[in-house]
Image: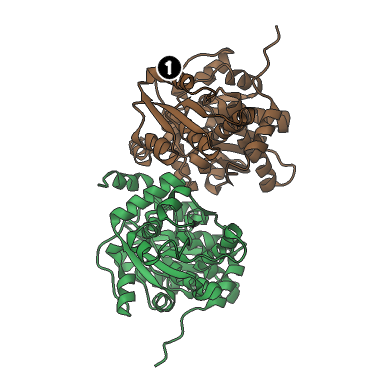
Chain colours: A green, B brown
């Protein structure tokens, strides 16, 4: 039996790139001699999505979804989602910039700072409900506003295509920094819901084919992607939560098949590794990444990754630093307790 | 009686700019919509010296001093300084990159991380002595190595000229970002020993003349610059120390006359203001500045500055974020205790 078709292909990412470029930041690619030295590679390019609007790559997918929905229906009245994290802020601003109302359902346990960002800074309408009622609350809002559209944080193919523009830029910036025709040997991408991972795997395969290894990075205590990849079918996370809070989510029926088709390896890292490597980036690169982004750096510097992808054969590595939305004081207090 | 000539003039800064540009990073100028909104200005350009080699602007002055010394004496055997801070790391790397040995006298109370950076990362020879013996230890080292040169962190005119290249870049980047012929109405510069402030005041006056206001920013508890400026003569700091530890230093006989000649105003800010504004930059701009750099942001957003330099008449402001060398965990613990 032939596998069902994937939910997106390379032309979708290319189209998203053209569509959203006027609205998103082309984020810088930085490097750091100390981290390069620790990695034993020739070059490590860090794609800094912490500097993206709303502080994470999520603004790309949200912008693509809103623009696609408006192309299909110029009178689009509203977009709706449920999220307590980076997607909420991203969709709020993306919609606002296109003159579309955003309705965000948030759990009533969401931190005050995130609620304020979505409601006050980005001017979305917020509905607070118990976490168990978030889908029904979103459905109710969709029913109330005829023509409004639901934008899922990671499963929406328009969102996935938008996230893939991170590597569309990174591939261009690799040539700018390492010379025309240069490619990266490996790109490391954090995985949570899988929107970033799947979209960028399509971008990388579409432009660089099999010349690049695609490696995902995941917290060990929420390793559904690793276990699903190994089992060949979707498995669920347990109740534990990682300090890499952007990654406390599940692959889904759209993202998992794309990842299965394109990704070479998935590595997991401990909570202590995440905190240590997040701090390393803070203090050495001076970029305030969130711990979700530290997960990729932890893989880069792990013995397991170096053993399978030796620096001599894989001298040039890219790492996506996915976001920078973090309560510094809270996370620094956790760092202070590291052994 | 005519005032004695200043220790440097604009051609010295221009020469330094040409001399050091191949060796230093042209640091990015970033902005942030939230901070612009809080400032009520049209544009705020943040010059990010946290991304400079060794994590601060100090690398510029150190590089200029080493290159000048080598021009005068190609066989220069060594440079010597005493510093526990950013100048130590900067001179260590600047000398190493030019094949010159660096001898750094550090107080035996210096934090382990700073000692390791200077000795292990940047490969300088370190002499640890009680703080009271640092000058005599440096003099001893200079006597031991014939032809070696002392490089003072802020009083050396070669260092001052090198620091002035921050604004040489910023003035070009202002035109790149705001359009050809654009100028900033005000530039805010943190002041400690005064090397950054005096060098950049010469750069700004040399190229933009009196079209730009030059405002210095200083912690209130180490306000020797403010009090010296008001008194017209050098006065000393008391024993208190600021969390903006790069600014716990004194103006000297070389920097003060330059500042007196060029600067329009000096504003002081409280320790709580410094911590609050440092955190604001961390969490909004995602740049891990040190508290010394937060001092300038605190002035930008202060009522006193807004009152004297109203946004309507002074719409475009530049702020020098001077460095990013900070123990995040330690400073975040102080932030957690803010009222």
Q: Residue at x 48, y 66 (%)?
A: A185
Q: Bin the neighbour count of mark 1 within 10 Å (Cα to Cα): few under 14, some 14-19, many 20 and up.
A: few
Q: Chain of mark 1?
A: B
Q: In the picture provided, is B154 more to the left or to the right than A154? A: right
User: Which image quadrant is residue B273 in?
Assistant: top left
Q: Residue B97 at x, y = what percent?
A: 53, 40
Front in this rendered view, residue B127 or B233: B127
Q: How many marks?
A: 1
User: Which image quadrant is residue B21 in?
Assistant: top right
Q: Residue tagged by mark 1?
A: B136
Quarter in which the N terminus of chain A is drawn = bottom left
Using the image, determine if residue B25 lies above or below residue A99: above
Given the current orientation, which residue lies at the most extreme right position? B181
- The answer to whether residue A70 is seen in the rendering is no
Front in this rendered view, residue B290 or A142: B290
Q: Secondary structure at mark 1?
A: helix
Front in this rendered view, residue B327 or B312: B327
- The answer to whether residue A292 is seen in the rendering is yes
Q: Residue A161 at x, y = what percent?
A: 51, 72
Q: Residue at x 51, y 65 (%)?
A: A184
Q: Residue at x 35, y 44 (%)?
A: A329
Q: In the picture provided, is A283 more to the left or to the right than A231? A: right
Given the current orientation, which residue lies at the most extreme bottom position? A1
Q: Residue B189 at x, y = what percent?
A: 57, 31
Front in this rendered view, residue A61 or A218: A218
User: Which image quadrant is residue A229 in?
Assistant: bottom left
Q: Residue A169 at x, y = what percent?
A: 56, 63
Given the current orientation, which residue lies at the most extreme top position? B1
Q: Residue at x 30, y 78 (%)?
A: A231
């Amino acid at each position: 039996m032939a596998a069902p078709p994937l939910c997106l292909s390379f032309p979708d990412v290319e189209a998203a790139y053209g569509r959203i470029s006027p609205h998103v930041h082309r984020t810088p690619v930085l490097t750091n001699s100390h981290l390069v030295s620790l990695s034993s590679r020739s070059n490590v390019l860090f794609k800094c999505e912490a500097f993206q609007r709303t502080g994470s790559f999520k603004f790309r997918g949200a912008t693509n979804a809103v623009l696609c929905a408006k192309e299909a229906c110029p009178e689009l009245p509203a977009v709706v989602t449920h999220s307590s994290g980076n997607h909420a802020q991203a969709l709020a601003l993306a919609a606002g910039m296109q003159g579309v109302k955003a309705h965000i359902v948030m759990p009533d346990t969401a931190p005050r700072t995130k609620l304020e960002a979505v409601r006050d800074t980005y001017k979305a309408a917020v509905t607070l409900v118990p976490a168990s009622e978030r889908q029904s609350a979103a459905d109710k809002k969709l029913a109330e506003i005829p023509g409004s559209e639901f934008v899922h944080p990671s499963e929406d193919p328009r969102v996935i295509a938008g996230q893939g523009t991170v590597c569309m830029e990174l591939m261009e910036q690799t040539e700018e920094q390492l010379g025309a025709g240069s490619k990266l040997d490996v790109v490391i991408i954090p995985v949570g819901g899988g929107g970033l991972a799947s979209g960028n795997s399509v971008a990388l395969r579409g432009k660089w084919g099999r010349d690049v290894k695609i490696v995902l990075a995941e917290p060990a205590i929420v390793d559904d992607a690793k276990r699903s990849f190994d089992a060949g079918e979707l498995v669920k996370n347990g109740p534990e939560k990682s300090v890499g809070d952007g990654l406390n989510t599940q692959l889904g029926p759209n993202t998992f098949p794309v990842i299965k088709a394109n990704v070479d390896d998935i590595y997991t890292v401990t909570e202590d590794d995440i905190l240590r490597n997040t701090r390393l980036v803070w203090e050495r690169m001076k970029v305030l990444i969130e711990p979700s982004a530290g997960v990729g750096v932890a893989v880069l510097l792990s013995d397991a990754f170096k053993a399978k992808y030796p620096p001599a054969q894989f001298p040039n590595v890219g790492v996506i630093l996915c976001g920078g939305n973090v309560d510094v004081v809270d996370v620094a207090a956790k760092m202070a307790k590291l052994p």
